[in-house]
Image (cartoon, helix red, strand yellow):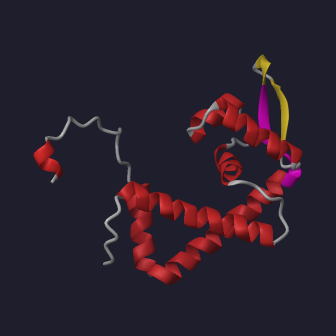
């Protein structure tokens, strides 16, 4: 095993970026509209029937302004559209256009191929164990008591 000395959140972040970088580069190479990692993340949390900007921001863990900017970029690219929310006269739903649906399906195919590539590189058994660990419910995030300075050494 290769110990980098990095903590698990850092390693998980690197793994996410590996997938994002490969996905976005592959889509761009195939001639798809350029999207940022934030815009790609928005696609991942968007409901089929549409989602409000506030809910997108909550799901993505970003500000409403950041989500709004990502939405506007994707609307301008023809991948998303804004439609009236039937449950609220004041809100609008964000949903994929036909082109956005096609791009979303292509991204899914690319991600499946990337998982296969990862399994080839690290071994199928390791890839399966990684998936099993990440799919196992971790429970509610704990609030840990302060550790003593001696425990940090």
2 left or right, relative to 81: left
Q: Looking at the picture, does residue 150 appear above or below residue 59?
A: below
Counting from the top left corner in percent of width and height, residue 93 is at 77, 31
How many numbered marks, from 0 up? 0
Residue at 84%, 49% in the rendered image: 79
Task: Label the magenta part by its dominant secondary structure.
Answer: strand
The residue most toward the left is: 150
146 left or right, relative to 32: left
Task: Identify which residue, 53 or 13, lies in the foreground.
Answer: 13
Q: Quick check: can you spot residue 50?
A: no
Q: Looking at the picture, does residue 87 appear above or below residue 81?
A: above
Task: Identify which residue, 33 or 6, lies in the foreground.
Answer: 6
Counting from the top left corner in percent of width and height, residue 107 is at 72, 62
148 left or right, relative to 144: left
Counting from the top left corner in percent of width and height, residue 147 is at 17, 40
Residue at 69%, 32% in the rendered image: 65
Residue at 20%, 36% in the rendered image: 146
Counting from the top left corner in percent of width and height, residue 6 is at 35, 62
Q: For residue 117: magenta?
A: no
Instruction: Check the picture and name the quadrant holding the N terminus.
Output: bottom left
Q: For residue 98: magenta?
A: yes
Q: Quick check: can you spot residue 7?
A: yes
Task: Identify which residue, 12 or 93, lies in the foreground.
Answer: 12
Instruction: Check the picture and name the quadrant holding the C terminus.
Output: bottom left
Q: What residue span does the magenta drawing correspond to?
A: 92-99
């Amino acid at each position: 095993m290769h110990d980098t000395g990095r903590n698990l959140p850092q390693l998980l972040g690197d793994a996410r970026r590996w997938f994002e970088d490969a996905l976005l580069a592959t889509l761009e190479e195939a001639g798809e509209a350029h999207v940022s990692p934030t815009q790609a993340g928005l696609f991942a949390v968007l409901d089929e029937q549409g989602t409000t900007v506030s809910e997108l921001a909550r799901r993505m863990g970003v500000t409403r302004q950041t989500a709004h900017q990502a939405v506007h970029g994707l609307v301008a690219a023809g991948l998303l559209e804004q439609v009236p929310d039937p449950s609220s006269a004041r809100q609008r739903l964000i949903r994929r256009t036909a082109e956005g649906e096609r791009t979303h399906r292509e991204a899914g195919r690319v991600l499946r191929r990337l998982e296969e590539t990862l399994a080839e590189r690290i071994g199928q058994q390791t890839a399966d164990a990684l998936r099993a660990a990440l799919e196992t419910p971790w429970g509610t995030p704990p609030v840990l008591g302060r550790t003593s300075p001696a425990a940090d050494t």
